[in-house]
Image: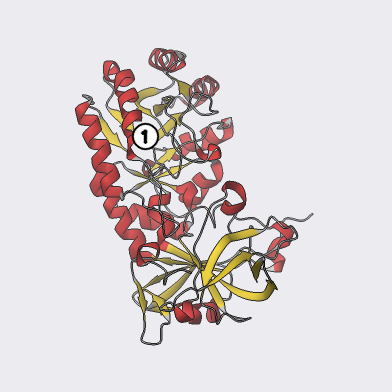
Amino acid sequence: MANPIPSRLLPDNTSIDENGSGSIAGCNLVELAEEYGTPLFVYDENHLRARCREAVKAFGEGVAYAGKAFLCGAMSRLVVEEGMNIDVATGGELYMALHAGIDGSRLIMHGNNKSESELRMALEAGVSRIVVDSFDELERLQILHKETGISPKILLRITPGVEAHTHEFISTGQDDSKFGFTVSTGLALEAVERAVKTEAVELVGIHAHIGSQVFKVDSFIRAVEVMAEFSNPLELPELSIGGGLGVSYLEEDHAPSITEWGEAVQTACAQTGIKAKVTAEPGRAIAAAAAITLYRIGTIKELEGLRTYVAVDGGMSDNPRPVLYGSGYETFLPRSMDKKRDRSIRMVGKHCESGDLLVREGWIPSDVAIGDVIATPVTGAYGHSMGSNYNQVLRPPVIFVKDGEATEVVARETFPDLVRRER
């Protein structure tokens, strides 16, 4: 049995009326489901803005939002309005930000295998920084320099050899990684030497990213210590600690705030003698808790002595994290948010496989019924961005809510959209 959903797992501007019905930013959740249909991503716009401001305060000018967490035109404009840059990891993310009207000087180009065409796009757009991940990429930039004469400012992504306590698929700072130049093997120093010698790039700093969904600030502090030992003698003006700060998905989770993370990193940098400007790239910590996903229940299957299956009109196509990483989520009924959640369920989707699991162990009020709107909180990161059309299911719309008004920022796909690229 579980208590009503904890407020810390909900968007900042969530409220519950005298009937127990939930709203975000003055917009009733059940009414939103009726108007826009389900599944539906609902983002608290002022929550997003507050986390952006917190990141800017913690790390200063140059802090970047990791667009891979959640990116669309409206989100691109929002984070830049709040003083953040945007970290893009592919040509598609770069195109998305540029299409939204973002100036290239506010973009940082990432990616472990950037193609020549993606690098050319980045140069033409005038991106602020390119985070170089390999010797092959340095060679591509040399080729493009001969063609264009452009020498972009770059950071070298180093692999500090720090094990982040997270899922192996999202742990990136250990030596055995596809990312970056490894410090322990000497590749990082060789990369610095090559970058300094060539006129094709301007080396301005070092970058590291130890992984995602990291709860322990100690892991970041250890990364800072390794980076300081490596980078201090180089006297470069910039150092990026990357992103990866974890967020609370479950009632028992306790994650540091952006402010706490920033203070720990800045203190560690000062103690290790880092004089470079220190910045970061939060993504999940900005977007995740700002949103919930609304579904509608289609079937309830009772298996006496085993469990209750609740099937909804979405699934792994709008949130693949439980399938990929075994990620856990809470559940609640927006119509009765003040009630005890005293019924154990397994929430599953509509896709044609048993692995289509959204919540392994959820709790909702016992009066749940077919047709109810059910919600999962903390779905603002890596749901929309990792979504798919598995089984030709239509991808959900995204709405931003603020001051009692809802704005559709990404429309629901239609059946004609599914065949638009057919030839």
Q: Look at the image and tell me in which quarter the C terminus lies.
A: bottom right
Question: Does 355 sit left or right of 235 as displayed?
Answer: right
The amino acid on which the numbered mark 1 sits, given as a three-letter code, is Ser
The spot of residue 342 in percent (x, y) is: 50, 74
Residue at horizontal 58 percent and vertical 32 percent from the top: 115
Residue at horizontal 47 percent and vertical 40 percent from the top: 166
Question: Does 81 sit left or right of 399 as displayed?
Answer: left
The spot of residue 338 in percent (x, y) is: 40, 78
Q: Secondary structure at mark 1?
A: helix
Residue 162 vs 346, above or below: the answer is: above
Q: Nearer the viewer, residue 300 or 356?
A: 300
**Does any portion of residue 312 appear in the rendered image?**
no
* Picture quadrant where residue 36 is located: bottom right
Residue at horizontal 56 percent and vertical 31 percent from the top: 113
Q: Tell me the residue that label 1 is attached to.
A: 219
The spot of residue 352 in percent (x, y) is: 75, 60
**Residue farthest to the bottom, as pictured:** 19
Name the colour scheme. secondary structure
Residue 92 vs 207, above or below: the answer is: below
**Residue farthest to the front, as pictured:** 305
Question: Does 240 sit left or right of 198 as displayed?
Answer: left
**Residue farthest to the right, as pictured:** 423
* Picture quadrant where residue 266 is located: top left
